[in-house]
Amino acid sequence: MALRPESPDLQKRLAAEVARPQGLIAGIDALDPGIAGAVLLRARFRPDRYRPELFRELGLDRPEQLARAVPKRCCEYLAGRLLARAALAALGHPGGPVLPGPGRAPVWPAGAAGSISHSGDLCACLALRMAGKPVHPGVDVETVADARNLDAILKLCCTPADRALIAADPDRTALRATLLFSAKEALYKALYPVFRKVAPFEVAELAAPPSDGLLHLRLTAELHPSLPAGGVFALRYLTWAAAQGSGQGHGDRQVLTWILHEPQQPGPAPKPKT
C-alpha cells in the first residue's frame, strides 16, 4: 500500500524530525514516489547551523571516513543520514544506523533499502521496506547546470545520442542535460549492488526525450549477465524552482530523479547445437 505524502500521521512524524536537529534541517517535503510502500523525502538543510557535536547530540555515528573531512562534507553527510532516519520512521521501521559501505554506498539496516543524495543545501532520500527478493533504489538531486557545468556534462557525461536529443530542444538544453546527468547517477546507484563497479557515464544513454515526469535510459554495454546491452530503464523525475534564501539564484531550478531496480535472474544459457 502506498504511503500518502499528505497523510497527517506522516506530516506529524516529519515535523518531529525537523524539530530535532536544532535548526540544521530547514524543512522536509514528502513526495509521491509512484512506488507502492516507498517513501521519498526532500529536505533543505542549513550548513551555517552545523556543529561537529551534532553527531553525538543527535545519536548518529560519525564514521572514520569523515575524520579529516571539511565541515561542508560532514554537514552533507549528517543531513543525509537525518533524512534517512526520517524516512525509516515514516516507514514504521525500527531504524538503525545507515553507514557508508563499499564505494560509499549506504548500508541500510536489516529489512530496509534506500538511497541518499545531496547537492548544495538540498538532500533527498528514497527508502522502502524489504519484503522477499532484494530491490535497489537510486535517487539523485541536482541544481540545473550553469554554463561551466553544462559544458562539462555535455563533454564528459553524454554519448552522441544524448547530445542529439538534448540539442533538439535548445531552450531547455541545461535542464535536459542536468536531468540526464542526474538520471545516470540515480540509475548507477540502483545498479551498483548488482555489478559492484563504477560505471562510466557512456554506458547508458537517453532512449527518448524526457517527458511528463518520465525518462528512459538504455544500456550501451553489458554490465552484468542480468544487465545486458540494450536494456531500458524508466526513471521518474521532478523539477522545481529554487526557494528564495536557499543560496541558489532565484531563477535556478532543481531536479530530482529516482528509480527502483528489481534484479532479474539471467535466463539459462542456450544449449550448444549438435
Image (cartoon, rainbow, N blue to C red):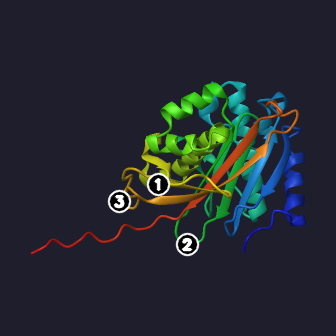
Q: Earlier in the sequence, mark 2 or mark 1?
A: 2
Amino acid type assigned to the residue bearing label 1 in the image: Arg
Gap between marks 3 and 1 measured at Cα: 15 Å
Q: Are marks 3 and 1 in contact (CB under 8 Å)?
A: no
Residue in the image at 77% along x and 53% along y: 86
Circle count: 3
- Of the two numbered discs 3 and 1 in the rendering, the one whose residue sits closer to the viewer: 1
Residue bearing mark 3: 225
Task: State the residue at coordinates (61%, 52%).
Answer: 210
State the residue lying farthest toward the left.
274
> What residue sits right under mark 2 in the picture?
132
In this image, 88 relative to 270: left or right? Answer: right
Foreground disc of the pair 2, 1 = 1
Q: Is residue 198 visible?
A: no
Residue 199: where, in percent of width, then height?
A: 44, 43
Quadrant where the image shows the N terminus: bottom right
Q: Is residue 21 above or below residue 145?
A: below
**Can you tell which quarter of the image residue 119 is in?**
top right
| Label 3 vs 1, first from the N-terminus | 1
Bin the neighbour count of mark 1 within 10 Å (Cα to Cα): few under 14, some 14-19, many 20 and up. some
Residue type at tag 3 = Pro
Locate residue 91 relative to residue 216 in the image: left or right.
right
Q: CA distance from mark 2 to mark 1?
A: 27 Å
Picture disc at residue 35: none
Element marked by disc 1: strand
Query: How far separated are the C-alphas under marks 3 and 2?
Result: 22 Å
State the mark number for residue 218: 1
* Image spot of residue 208 (x, y percent): 54, 54
Would you say 201 lies left or right of 130 here? Answer: left
Q: What amino acid is found at the position of numbered circle 2 in the picture? A: Gly
